[in-house]
Image: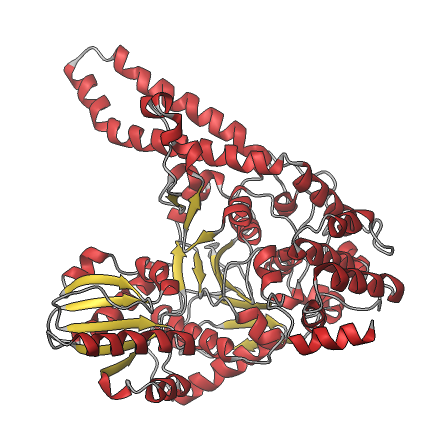
Amino acid sequence: MSAAAHLSTGKINLSLLRDFYRRELLESLDKCSGTKALVWDDALTGAFGLIAEYSLLKEHEVEKMFPLRSSGLPPSNVQNIIFVTRPKLSLMEQIAQNLLQEEQKGGFRKDYHIIFVPRRSLLCDKKLKEMGVYGTITNFEEFQLSLIPFDSDLLSMEMESSFRECYLENDFTSMHYAAQSLMTLQALYGIIPNICGKGDCAKHIVDMMLRMRRELGGREPQITPQIDNLLILDRNVDLLTPLLSQLTYEGLIDEMFGINNTSVKLPPEKFQTGPQQQEDPQGVSSEPKKVILNSLDELYADLRDKNFNAVGSIVSKKAKVITAEFDERHSAKTVSEMKQFVSKLPHLQQVRASLSTHTSIAELVKEATDTDEFMDSLRCQQEFINGMETDKIHPYIEDCMGRQEPINKVLRLVCIQSYCNNGLKPKVLDHYKREIIQTYGYEHMVTIMNIEKAGLLRPHGNRTYPAIRKSMRLIVDDVNEQNPHDIAYVYSGFAPLSVRLVQYYARPGWRSITEVLNLLPGPTVEEIQQIPVALRKRRSSIGSTHSSTGEQKVTLVFFLGGVTYAEIAALRFLAQQDDGGTEYIVASTRILHSRKLMDSVIEYSKPIRLIDAFVQGIN
């Protein structure tokens, strides 16, 4: 079954959540009577674009939209200027500069409003007061956009700093937002009967959810539960998976070009076609090609979760099918046959355009994966996950530092080696630290402290990885990338531990892997939420993922700290298995890949001069 076919049968309609956010947004806008201009924090435009189109906003008197810039606002004759922003001090400074410049300009009187996403902050109020513009603001609003529907089975909070805040700074604000978002889901889709989690953050969220439900005092909407199980996983339960190179089509696109709010910007050269390019090769547009990536594109829905080695044959088969369907016009002899072909034409043209786009994207990805740099890095990673060359200084990592390759890449490989060796021996660890600091600068003393605190790098300890690797069958030697039979296909032979945990939760249950759970960080949490008898669905047993009637159960898997597209692909693969019995919805604090994970803990700031002077004094 194709991904598209599977998704279309989903029992949970996430458009209900999208409609909820849309209603809330429009209510906030309608509080300002008269014409409006929205001034957007850049980081929010993509997310809001997924819940409310500009045409809808225009119906509510939104006449202009501008990006938030310290250089000021373009001229406009609207009655209301509405700033839509995250609660960040740097953004408050930009808003204040805008307001001061507007005051100097004089002219047409306007009312100024701020919509904070997701929450207003006392520090932001203080900053606006310090800059003398607080009294200029007519109205402050909060808009709690938390879980953004990216697709029919995927939700993301897109909180970029969640991993750093939780694991480095002990700031659990994002966990509070996550708990609130789950309460919103329960208000829309009913109370989730069975909650299970692994990790400190997971326990934190479950405790908050239960407290929030008690505070409601039974005033929650009376809805028959549509989600049967909630499984919450801390990212640090499986730190290895997001460090590895993803090998699915969607995962590789994200790692190489970056998918943001379901769209990607690509080099334009591959997308220039037709006589214009042949006549003027120099006239190629320098503007990146923006492509929307979601399941509404049938071909992308088929391709995205496939191992990249299987993509070429699928594209080739699809091209032959489309060519054959276009050729049908030659055999159409009667008027009815011509009409039938013409009715199919728009769809065929749409598929042909999609085919052209994904052929170009696949070529871009292939160019990158064929490089020695990619293959050597992948080879090194696969040696580590198989337990080879993990206990000594690795020559490839040495070579990378010698060539001064990006520190992100070097630290990522060191962290993979550390994880697979249950920590590094003191001699190896000290060597890597010394080389990193000498090669990349003394500011990375702080980086090393960060990755150690986050659990990504540590001294040699108990041999847990080999035991987990064997018990959970993380290495699958006979993986079939074209027609997979195991989730390990997403990393060409390595099964993500996070998804194996989900797989065991569905069948035969976590009680069968108690020893493995005890080796992983953080507590294991299990809670049963009581539901009024009238709202209960028939179920074979509490916590089961199968019903007595044979219908599919729905499990919401929530990743705290980020999830990769390869893990999402593996969960979709599980849902499509004939014996699966479970439909999965994936939620996360953000969509992650190795570079994003490492960037969240690396200190890129220059060292302060006192440190330089101190080091020079030692030398």
Residue 64 or residue 120, whichever sits in front: 64
Horizontal side of residue 78 vs 593, given as left or right = left
The residue closer to the viewer here, 203 or 378, is 378
Image vertical order of residue 72 relative to residue 307, above or below? below
Whether residue 469 is visible here, answered yes or no, is: yes
In the rendered image, the vertical position of residue 105 relative to residue 490, given as above or below = below
Q: Which residue is drawn at 36% across and 27% down?
A: 273
From the top left corner, tell me how far across and down residue 95 is, in percent.
Answer: 31, 75
Q: Quadrant of residue 392?
A: bottom right
Compared with 116, 296 (above or below) is above
Res 115 → quadrant = bottom left
Judging depth in this view, the residue of 437 and 339 nearest the camera is: 437
Q: Residue at the spot x=81%, y=57% of the render?
A: 466
Drawn side of residue 487 relative to residue 211, left or right? right
Q: Which of 492 and 597 is in front in this view?
A: 597
Residue 385 rendering spot, x and y as whole percentages: 76, 51
At 44% from the left and 87% from the top, the residue drawn is 214
Which quadrant of the figure contains the C terminus? bottom right
Residue 38, position in %: x, y? 24, 67
The image position of residue 615, as x and y in percent, is 77, 73
Q: In this view, does 187 lie to the left or right of 231?
A: left
The residue positioned 55% from the left and 63% from the top of the image is 562
Res 142 → quadrant: bottom left
From the viewer's perspective, tell me whether residue 62 is left or right of residue 198.
left
Give the total of numbered labels. 0
